[in-house]
Image: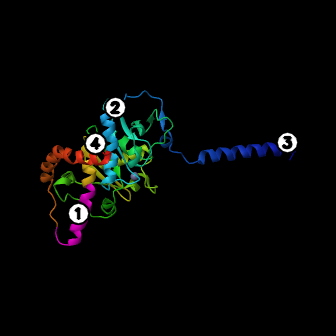
Amino acid sequence: MTRTTTRARLIISRLLMAAALATAAPVVQAPALAQSTAAPSAGPAEPALIEDLVAAGRILVNQGVLDGFGHVSVRHPKDPTRFLMARSVAPALVVADDIVEHDLDGNGIDAKGRTLFLERFIHAEVYRARPDVMAVVHSHSPATIPFGASQVPMRAMFHNSAFLAAGVPVFEIRKAGGMTNMLVGSGALGKALAEALGDKPAVLMRGHGNVVVGPSIQLAVFRAVYLEVNARLQLQAISLGGPITYLEAEEGVKADKVNEVISARPWDIWKKQALGK
Ligand SMILES: [Zn+2]
């Protein structure tokens, strides 16, 4: 074998190895990395709406629903294909300048290099699937976790959590993504979560937390607070032993109509406490 032939074979074998490696390379989830787009903005939202969005995060921290994690968003009033949510920052520290417009693929519109929440796809895909939803809360509120991990369904204990009487589905991320890091970090997982939510106001996420939706920031916050309260009350009722009488679906519908009206009352005091004014 001549030296030239050997060298040629070496080059060909290296090329084949490189091609094999390129084929076998793991697929990087592009949407999670595509954080910003130059698409035109839907325009500025009313300062009062931004204030409510900032207040919502702080209220939920004060109420023990959010901690250093979790987020609240609101659909953009001028464009249903956009929503507003803070950059990646602890909810108690959010200020108006942190609010970033997002599209339904999870891209930030003019994010100015700010890091976005990894789980923004939860919000994007719920807004895409549910035209009735105007606000979304994602939290890891602790008392709800046992209900996502056990076979005991969460059920409505009292009138403030009447929205739960419609049923509380559980999102099993393994069905959608196999063995994941438990986070909804892609559009595909967000879509699967939105499908698990269906037409309900809340969905539990096994081993993670929950998502609560509403027709306004005020009602989404109200529901997120009383989802956590309901979980604590139900755990207490179970510990008492014996049968438990939950709200029936019809009672839930009737009580929830009242809650839609009176949710402004706790909101006023929660907002005052959260913003100190
Ligand atoms: Zn989360």
Q: Residue furthest bottom?
A: 241
The residue where tag 4 is placed is 217
Q: Are marks 4 and 2 in contact (CB under 8 Å)?
A: no
Does label 2 or label 1 sit earlier along the sequence? 2
- Looking at the rendered image, the disc whose residue lies closer to the viewer, 3 or 4, is 4
At numbered mark 4, what does the secondary structure look like: helix, strand or loop? Answer: helix
Question: Disc 1 marks which amino acid?
Answer: Leu
- Mark 3 and mark 4: Cα distance apart in space: 73 Å
Query: Which contiguous range is marked in magenta?
Result: 227-243
Circle 2 residues within 10 Å: few <14, some 14–19, many ≥20: few
Does label 1 or label 4 sit earlier along the sequence? 4
- Mark 2 and mark 1: Cα distance apart in space: 38 Å
The residue where tag 3 is placed is 4
Disc number at residue 164?
Answer: none
The residue where tag 1 is placed is 233
Disc number at residue 45?
Answer: 2
- Tell me where residue 170 appears, x and y as whole percent: 31, 55
